[in-house]
Image (cartoon, coloured by chain):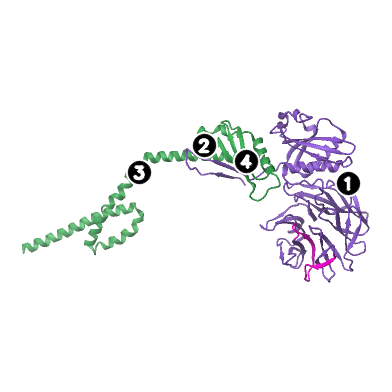
Chain colours: A purple, B green
Amino acid sequence: MIRIFYLIFINLVLHSELILEITESANQPVKIAVLQKNDSSFKGQEIVNIISNDLKRTGEFEVLGLDQLLSIPLNESEVIQRDWLLLDVDSIIFIETKETDNSLDINYSIFNVSYNDTEDKRKVLGLPDSIRQSSHYVSDGIYEFFFGIKGISATKLMYVTKNSDIYRLMVSDADGFNEQVLLKSNKSIISPAWSSDAKDIAYVSFENNRAQVFIQNLESGNRELILSSSSSVSSPAWSPNKKFLALTSTMDGNSEIYLIELKTKKISRLTENSSIDTEPAWSTDGRKIIFTSDRAGSPQIYEIDIRTKIKRRLTTEGNYNARASYLNKNEIVFVHRGTENFNIAKLNLKTRNLEVLTSTQNDESPCIAPNGNVIIYATKDGSLSYLAGVNISSKVKFRLPALYGELKEPAWSPFLR
Amino acid sequence: MIKWFSAFILSILVHALIFLIYSFLDSVQEETTDRKITNVSFVQPEKKDTNTKKPTEKKDINTKKPTIPELIKEPEKKTIKDLDKYLTEEQDQETFNKKLDKVEQISAQVIKDIESIWIRPNNIKKGMYAEFNLTIDRLGNIDNFNIKRSSGSDTFDRAAMNAIKKYKKIKYIKNVDEETYRIYFANFTLRFKPE
C-alpha cells in the first residue's frame, strides 16, 4: 500500500515540507554479472559458475550470462558504465582466484553500476581441494551484502532416499553436490535431525523392526541407540544447547513427549493424556517445545513451556495441522490442510495470520534453512516423491533435482562456520 | 349623550387602529420568519397569543422590531461588502487545491516509480525505516541526496540509496510551475518504511 504523507502547510507561502513514504518494494531480483578478474582460468570459471548457480538458486538474484553482456571488463577500471546501465545491471561481482600449493583464496569485489564504483571487497581463504565450499562462502558473503542476512549455500542437507527398497540416509551440500551415504538399510529410516553444532545427527531407524532413535557422530561415524526399550521411540529433536533430546515414545502405553538428558540419560515426561502427542520441535531459546496432538479430535499444534509445563493450542484453522517448527520467536511453519490439499503454511502467533506458502498438493516434512528464509519440504507428483523449496521473502518456489525414486524427510544443517 | 357616543366611536376606531397596526406588523414578521426557517416553529404559537394578550404582545412586537431589519439587511450588507474578498479567497483556495492535487499526483507517481526499483533486504525489523533528503533541480534531476535518518542497518540504507541513485530523475517536475517546484519539490524527504 502506498501512503503519502504531507506535513500540513504551516504557512502556505513560506514553509512546507513534503515527505514521501515508500512502503512496498520491487518483486524483481537483484541483477548482477559474475566475472573473473584480470585473467581467466579453468578453475576460476568453475568458481564463477558455482557462485552464479548459488545466487540464481536463491531466486533473489538474476545472474546474466557472458553471452548477454555488451562488454566484458577484466577489472573495475574497464567497466563502461553506459553498457551496464543499458542492461539495467545493479552490480558486477569480480572474482579473483589466488592459488598456491597449500591454499586457494578467493578475492571478490562488488562493483555498483549506478555509482560506477566498488562498494565492497572481501576475501575467502580456502584449501585447494575445497573449491566448492570456498565458492559457497563467497556466495553467502554476496547474499549477505545485498540482503542483510546470512546466505545458506555453504550449509548441508540431510534426507532419506528409497531406491529398490533400499533406504539411504544421505547428506549433501545445499546445492545437492557432494552426496554421502550415512546409513543404508532395508528398513525404513525417518526423522533425521541435526545437532546445533552440526557434528552429530539423530534419526529413527526401523532396522530392529520397531522405531528406535539413534544418534551418530558425523566425523567418526559412531552411533548410539538412545533409550533401549521395547516400545516405539521416534521424532528426535536436539535442544539448542545440545544437552537434551526431545522425542516421542509409547513407553507408558500411549504416545507422549519425553525429554532425555543425553549425559545422564535421565528421562522426564512432558505430556500426559490419552491422545497422541508427537513431533516435538524446540524454540530457538530452548524454553518451549511445539508438538502435534490429536487431543481435540484432529491433529493440531500445541506449545508447552518446559519449565512450567503450561500448554496452549496454537492452531485453530484447518482440520489437519502437524509437523511444526519455529521459524522464529513469533512464527511457526507446519503441514496444513485447509480443505483438501496438504500444504506448508506459516502462522504468526501474535497476529494469528495464517499464510499458505506452497501450491503443490501433498506436502510434508517442512524444514527451515538456518537463515530462516527458505523452507524445503517433501512433496509428491504422482508416484514420484521429491524435494521442493520456497523462499519466504521472494516467494520463489523451486524444485530440487530428483536422482532417486523417492526422496523425503529433509533436514537442513545449521550454519557450518 | 353625544360625548358617550363620540367616546364609543373613538374607542372602536382606536381598537380598530391597534388591530390594523398589529396585523400589519404581524404580517411583516411572518415574512421575515419565512426567510429564517429556524424561527418558524416558535413564531406560530406567539401568533395565537396575540388575540388574548394584546398589551404584552405589543411589547413583544416592539422589542422584536429592531431584529427584523437586522435579520434581513445585515447578511446582505456583509455579503455585498465581502463579495470581492470572498471571491478572491475562493479563487485562491481553488488554485491552492489544484496545486495540491498536482503535488499529490506527482508524489504518488514518484512513490510508484521508486517502489518498482527498491529491492529491500531481508533483515527488516519492526519499525525500521530510513529517511533521505533529496535536492532536485528544476528539470527534476536528483542533484544530491543525503541520509537524514539511518535505519541502523548498512544493508537497508544501501538498498534505499541504490533505489534513489537508480531513479536519477523525476521527469514530472518540469511540468509544474516555479512556485510548486520551489515549495514542494526542490527539497523533500523520502522515507523508506516497509510495512
Residue B18 belongs to the span the image colors magenta: no
Find numbered disc 2 in the image and state the secondary structure of the residue it sits on: helix
- Report the amino acid beneath label 1: Asn
Report the chain holding disc 4.
Answer: B
Reading the chain from its start, which is encountered first: label 4 or label 2? 4
Count of all numbered marks drawn on residues in the image: 4
- Report the amino acid beneath label 2: Ile
Q: CA distance from mark 1 to mark 4?
A: 45 Å
Residue at image x 15%, y 58%?
Answer: B13
Farthest-out residue, left: B1
Report the chain holding disc 1.
Answer: A
Q: CA distance from mark 1 to mark 2?
A: 63 Å
Asked if marks 1 and 2 fall on the same chain, the answer is no
Q: Where is residue A205 drawn, in percent x and y?
A: 89, 60
Residue at image x 28%, y 60%?
Answer: B47
- Report the amino acid beneath label 3: Thr
Looking at the image, residue A377 lies above or below residue A131 = below
- Of tags 1 and 4, the one toward the viewer is 1
Q: Is residue B13 visible?
A: yes
Report the chain holding disc 3.
Answer: B
What label sits on residue B79 in the rendered view?
A: 3
